[in-house]
Amino acid sequence: MPPAAFHLRATMLPYGDTPCDLWVAGGRVRTRPIDGADPLAPEGGNVRPGHVDAHLHHVTNRDYKDL
């Protein structure tokens, strides 16, 4: 069974506002079409190359009224 391939049509930030087509397979992003690739997400989103979302959600047992 071949590895899964995905197609994504999105705007690549911060480079512009024109959607582009990207294909993902085998851990690599490509600009050339891959036959039979499944759509990854609805059109209209954005892609941020190299972006890492490094935030966290802190949870505490304290009552916030005490802060």
Image (spheres, helix red, strand yellow):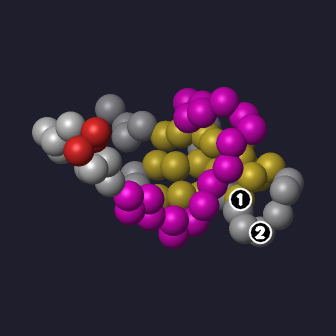
Q: Residue furthest front?
A: 66
CA–CA distance between discs 1 and 2? 6 Å
Magenta segment: does it hold 21? no
| x 32%, y 54%: residue | 56
Does dot 2 land on a helix, a strand or a loop? loop
Dot 2: few (<14), some (14–19), or many (≥20) neighbours within 10 Å?
Answer: few
Q: What percent of the width, then of the height, locates residue 3? A: 37, 40
Going by the numbered disc 1, the residue's amino acid type is: Met
In the image, is residue 39 part of the stretch drawn in magenta? Answer: yes
The local secondary structure at tag 1 comes to: strand
Segment tinted magenta in the rendering: 38-55
Label drawn at residue 34? none
Graded by Cα atoms within 10 Å as few (under 14), some (14 to 19) or many (20 or more), the crowding at tag 1 reads some
Q: Is residue 42 above or below residue 49?
A: above
Front residue of this view, candidates 66 and 62: 66
Image mark count: 2
Coordinates of residue 46 in the picture (x, y in percent): 67, 50
- At x 61%, y 40%, the residue is 7
Q: Which residue is mark 2?
A: 15
On the image, numbered disc 1 is attached to which residue?
Answer: 12
Residue type for callout 2? Tyr
Q: Nearer the viewer, residue 66 or 31?
A: 66
Q: Principal SS element in the magenta part?
A: loop
Q: Quadrant of residue 9?
A: top right
Q: Is residue 67 left or right of residue 9?
A: left
Q: Give the x, y percent position of residue 28.
A: 47, 59
Callout 1–callout 2 Cβ contact below 8 Å: yes
| Residue 37 seen in this snapshot | no
Pick out the residue farthest to the right.
18
